[in-house]
């Protein structure tokens, strides 16, 4: 791992990946644009990073077909948080790579990659992931499984040790040199997230405690759950 400056002074970026089509939501528009407490989900996600102590520069990766729609939403909601907009790719891997292209390789930095539809990531989690990346090369947010786990192999299910199973969330944060080098690899379907891409280079992955409230919106009921969480947080 290369030497890294004081994490409070090193440049920080967050690549917000918004590639969802909303298929499982049964929605007419992608889920990142659905309203949550009166504001599109994606805006909540950008606000989460803006409200952290880290305050990274924001890069939003969005399908090209929705760029104009997003600009109109920003005008409608008077959303003025500064961010760069770049087109998404064929897969999440290619979308992240497009975002990385906007970040200079000449200067060390810390780069977080975040699901656009994970709008309730706390500032504490965001800052902890940046700190882990500064200290260890990376910081991948995850939570211990609450449920018993079974693995199905050859039509036979086998119990796994629950305390050894972690559910991976985002942000996943890395030193820039580590992440950029990892994304020079050719794409393979085994790359399901940024940690798997970096791990394929032989890097150890360091976990950061996440939260079971750090929900990724996938199904319609997730919006209702988040509305309730927001209501309880402000009450």
Image (cartoon, rainbow, N blue to C red):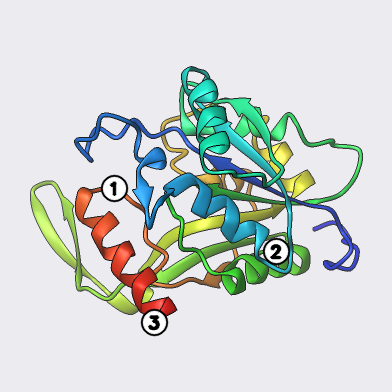
Badge 2 local density, few (<14 within 10 Å), some, or many (20+)?
many
> Circle 2 is placed at which residue position?
130
- In this rendering, the count of numbered labels is 3
Of 118 and 199, which appears nearest the observer? 118
Q: Residue at x 48, y 37 (%)?
A: 18
Residue 66 in the image, given as x and y percentages of width and height: 48, 23
Residue 149 as seen in the image, left or right of residue 116: left
Q: Residue at x 55, y 46 (%)?
A: 194
**CA gap, disc 1 and disc 2:** 26 Å
Q: Residues under labels 2 and 3: Cα distance?
A: 30 Å
Left or right: where does residue 21 sit relative to residue 168? left
Q: Earlier in the sequence, mark 1 or mark 2?
A: 2
Return the residue nearer the eye: 151 or 44: 44
Element marked by disc 2: helix
Query: Circle 1 sits on which residue?
Result: 218
Q: Quadrant of the N terminus?
A: bottom right
Residue 235: numbered disc: 3
């Amino acid at each position: 791992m290369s030497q890294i400056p004081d994490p409070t002074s090193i440049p920080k970026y967050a690549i917000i990946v918004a590639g969802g089509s909303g298929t499982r939501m049964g929605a007419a528009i992608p889920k990142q644009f659905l309203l949550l407490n009166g504001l599109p989900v994606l805006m909540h996600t950008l606000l989460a990073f803006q409200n952290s102590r880290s305050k990274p520069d924001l890069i939003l990766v969005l399908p090209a077909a929705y760029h104009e729609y997003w600009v109109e939403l920003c005008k409608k909601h008077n959303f003025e948080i500064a961010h760069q907009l770049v087109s998404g790719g064929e897969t999440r891997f290619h979308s992240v790579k497009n975002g990385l292209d906007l970040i200079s390789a000449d200067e060390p930095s810390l780069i977080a990659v975040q699901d656009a539809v994970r709008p309730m990531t706390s500032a504490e989690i965001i800052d902890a992931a940046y700190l882990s990346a500064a200290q260890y090369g990376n910081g991948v947010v995850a939570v211990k499984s609450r449920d018993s786990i079974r693995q199905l192999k050859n039509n036979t299910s086998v119990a796994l040790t629950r305390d050894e199973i972690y559910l991976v969330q985002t942000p996943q944060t890395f030193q820039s040199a580590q992440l950029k080098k990892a994304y020079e690899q050719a794409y393979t379907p085994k790359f399901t997230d940024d940690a798997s891409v970096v791990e394929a280079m032989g890097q150890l992955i360091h976990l950061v405690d996440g939260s079971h409230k750090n929900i990724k919106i996938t199904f319609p009921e997730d919006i209702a759950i988040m509305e309730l969480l927001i209501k309880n947080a402000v009450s």
